[in-house]
Amino acid sequence: MRIFLEQKRYQLLNMPNKIIIAIDGYSSCGKSTLAKSLAAKLAYVFIDTGAMYRAVALYFLRNNIDFDNEAQIVKALEEIKLNFVYNASSLKSDMVLNGENVEAEIREMRVSEKVSEVATIGPVRDFAVAQQQAMGEYKGIVMDGRDIGTVVFPTAELKIFVTADPAIRVERRFLELQITNPTIRKEEIEANLQHRDLMDTTRERSPLKQAEDAIVLDNTNMTREEQFNLALSWALAKIG
Ligand code: DC
């Protein structure tokens, strides 16, 4: 966290008129790719908030935390320290859980299967949102998630709601996961995405929904470059 704040202070001195860019949308529709490239172009900090929920889910799984036991959850959250550390090869930050780099492990299917459930838990959301808001204190940040434009930064200068055709999302996720897991099946991915969409949109606390002032970006028929150029033009218009 201290590294972020120092980075932010540095940016504040060097780049006036910085904004907050909130990117929300369904799982696997290209939010992180877009957020990462926008942040790199603007020299902003990129925060993948899904990674924070994934790291909490991983801790809960490793420590057999009962998702229905609030006292146990609150105690567990006191033991969790989340940090991001920059990875020069992926040009993004890796998730660090209590000093351990868990970037690869939090992307595994066993975490994906449980993370949406963990993200419905009130104390978990309070824990994550407080840290996310602190990271945005000095602006100059691109944050992606489900509730960034609605709850974390309701006054963000630019809000983008990303969507894509479900079949395209499955295909993209399949290609991504196949690299590390050649035996993964498309049906498994499709079921997981459907489950997560349902959990994310119907949960009581901060469900995934488009903020009223968000711009919708449907990237079904766009290349990454087209999507990036469009979002960058919106960002530059806001930055002035
Ligand atoms: O973006 P992702 O697929 O890595 O996110 C993992 C899960 O975390 C997703 O199922 C929903 C949840 N999430 C959330 O509830 N709020 C956020 N701001 C980010 C993610």
Image (tube, rainbow, N blue to C red):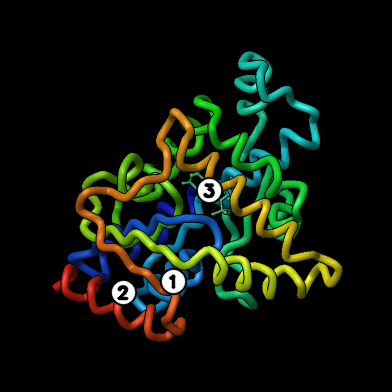
| Residue at image location 76% in from the left, 72% down from the top | 178
Q: For marks 3 and 1, give the CA distance.
A: 20 Å
Judged from the image, the secondary structure of the residue bearing numbered disc 3 is helix
Q: For mark 2, what is the residue?
A: 231
Q: Which amino acid does label 3 sit on?
A: Asp
Q: Which of marks 3 and 1 is nearer the N terminus?
A: 1
Return the disc, 3 or 2, that comes first in the chain's sequence: 3
Question: Any mark on residue 197, and which?
Answer: 3
From the top left corner, tell me how far across and down residue 131 is, in percent: 45, 40
The residue located at (67%, 72%) in the rendering is: 176
Number of residues whose C-alpha sits closer than 10 Å to that of mark 2, classed few (under 14), some (14–19) or many (20 or more): some
Taking the view exactly as shown, the residue that stands out farthest to the top is 71
Question: How many discs mark residues in the rendered view?
Answer: 3
Which image quadrant for residue 9? bottom left
> What kind of residue is marked 2?
Ala
Decide if ligand 1 comes within 8 Å of the CB at mark 3: no
What kind of residue is marked 1? Leu
Please state the horizontal and vertical placement of residue 150, each as a whole percent of the image: 31, 43
Q: Mark 1 points at which residue?
A: 34
Q: Residue at x 67, y 25 (%)?
A: 67
* Quadrant housing residue 142: bottom left
Do the residues under discs 2 and 1 have CB atoms within 8 angstroms?
A: yes
Q: Is residue 184 left or right of residue 171?
A: right
As drawn, the residue found furthest toward the left would be: 240
Q: Can residue 9 be seen in this view?
A: no
